[in-house]
Image: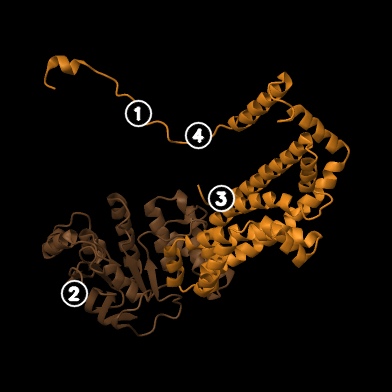
Chain colours: A brown, B orange
Amino acid sequence: MDIRLSGISHSYGDLEVLRNISLDIPSGRIVCVVGPTGCGKSTLLRLIGGLEQPTGGNVLQLGVPAADCLNPLTYVFQDYALLPWRSVAGNVSLVLEDHGLARADIKNTVSDVLARTRLTDFARTLPRQLSGGMKQRVGIARALAVKPAVMLMDEPLSALDSQTRELLMDDLAALWTRQPFTAVYVTHNLDEAVRMGHSIVVLSRSPGQIREIMHLEKPLHERSYGDKDLQFRQKYLWNLMRDEARAADAELINV
Amino acid sequence: MSDAEETDIARQVGFRGGGFAPKPHRWMGPAVFAVLIGLAEAGTRSGFISPLSLPKPSDVFLTFRELYESGMLWTHLAPTLTRLLIGASLGATAGIATGVMIGLFSYFRAGMVPLIAALFPIPKIALLPLFIIWFGIDEASKYALIAFGTFTPTVVATYCAVDNVDRTLVRMGQSFGMSWKSIVRKIILPGAMPGILSGLRVSLSIAIILLVAAEMLGAEHGIGAYILEAGSLYNLERLFAGVVILSLLGVLLNAVIGAIERYMLRWRT
């Protein structure tokens, strides 16, 4: 299943956040969205998943999701959004319970995704006992459990320290290599963008418009920490964004 | 600091980061009680405090023992506990239900919040005659008074607790396609539980306060009736014995809620 954004515009009252965004998200690819603070990248993600309605334009699903897909558009949140009163396994089973599955099916799916995110030993642990990196792995496991057609990742690694972020980027790349998934990956971190994205969409400062789309051909599992070519690409992106980022930083907040 | 003499001076950096962190001291609470009671006993025995202004704690204790041994304690306690149990559970149940409805439905909130704000400050004792007319002089009016008194604080605590449930968790539930019923049952209610329970602490204490008022409504037996009778006779020993029973009741209820909290909110630190 592909996603097509055609002429998306969005405003909060008088404040225009997004202007005329048209973009195709092809199946089996990770599309990164980068841009200066307040350019509307997270808003764009909420529009794609139907948590908000755009003021103009359409979000289209092209084709039908696979038959076993329980929740075609599935988020991974920056602040994890785990229920503190449920264990790791309970947080994953939460999103399966409403689909009329047999108890055994739920149990199998939960243990399968926990194994894929290497959380099997922590199934009975409560979120408060986990580190940030582990919490986000639970968030990813929960998203995988509903077999999404498109994963919508809102700054998934931004709350983590840089070492943990490296580890999780490797995990995500390994997950994708084993079984390619479609994702829209919003981040402000250019290093993450060049490591995770098959294409990188650069948004301009508010109101957000597409400035450039960069394509990266190198397979995900060959991209590693300190790759020369990737650093070159990252530098290019930064030069593209530097002035806008500075202007965005100096802007007064008037919401 | 290139000076040789200055580098020779090595001084320990003083610790200045202590305090402002409450620590548990289990013996402190009982100690305060013991000291106060001891002072009262010493004062009344020495004649420094006249027996007219404060009864001797040991006399209060003797009165209490007498009450216990004559079997009258249970005669008074049983109806009181029944009234408290029925009245408070009616009020708390209705309060939690109303509070959750206010938290969930905007129309209900718009209609009910001003009404609750209007009902809250009414001293329920002032409505005694009204309760007698509505519910009669027997038990029903006592239940109603206690229920009404617990209802309003429970409503306010509950809808504030529902309002304070993390909205990102609700959005998460919606984004995974959870049904409205599941979101309420699995996200909103457990998330509001800490606030509801701490609200119950307050409203159950209010229920005990209203007990005495309720037993003004022509009750023959009951701790409240016992206190009122002692008060009108200026029998301070009996008055204090009754008050102590109510205090103990409050401590007990608080401990019960504490135990419920420890069980239901195991997931909190």
Q: How many neighbours does mark 3 have within 10 angstroms: few (below 14), some (14-19), or many (20 or more)?
A: few
* Location of residue B168 with respect to A14 vertically, above or below: above
Mark 2 or mark 1, whichever is nearer to me? 1
Seen in the image, is B182 located left or right of residue B21? right
- Disc 1 target residue: B16
Question: Going from the N terminus, do you reach mark 4 or mark 3 first?
Answer: 4
Residue drawn 58% across and 30% down? B28
Between A153 and B29, which is closer to the camera in this rendering?
B29
Tell me the CA gap for discs 4 and 1: 18 Å
- Residue at image mark 4: B23
For the C terminus of chain A, which image quadrant? bottom left
Q: CA distance from mark 3 to mark 2?
A: 48 Å
Tell me the distance, in whole angstroms, between the alpha carbons under discs 1 and 3.
Answer: 34 Å
Position in image of residue B255 (x %, y %) = 65, 44
- Quarter of the image holding residue A251? bottom left
From the viewer's side, name the closer residue of B143 and A151: B143
Mark 1 neighbour class, 10 Å CA radius: few under 14, some 14 to 19, many 20 or more = few
> What residue is disc 2 on?
A210
Q: Which residue is mark 3?
A: B266
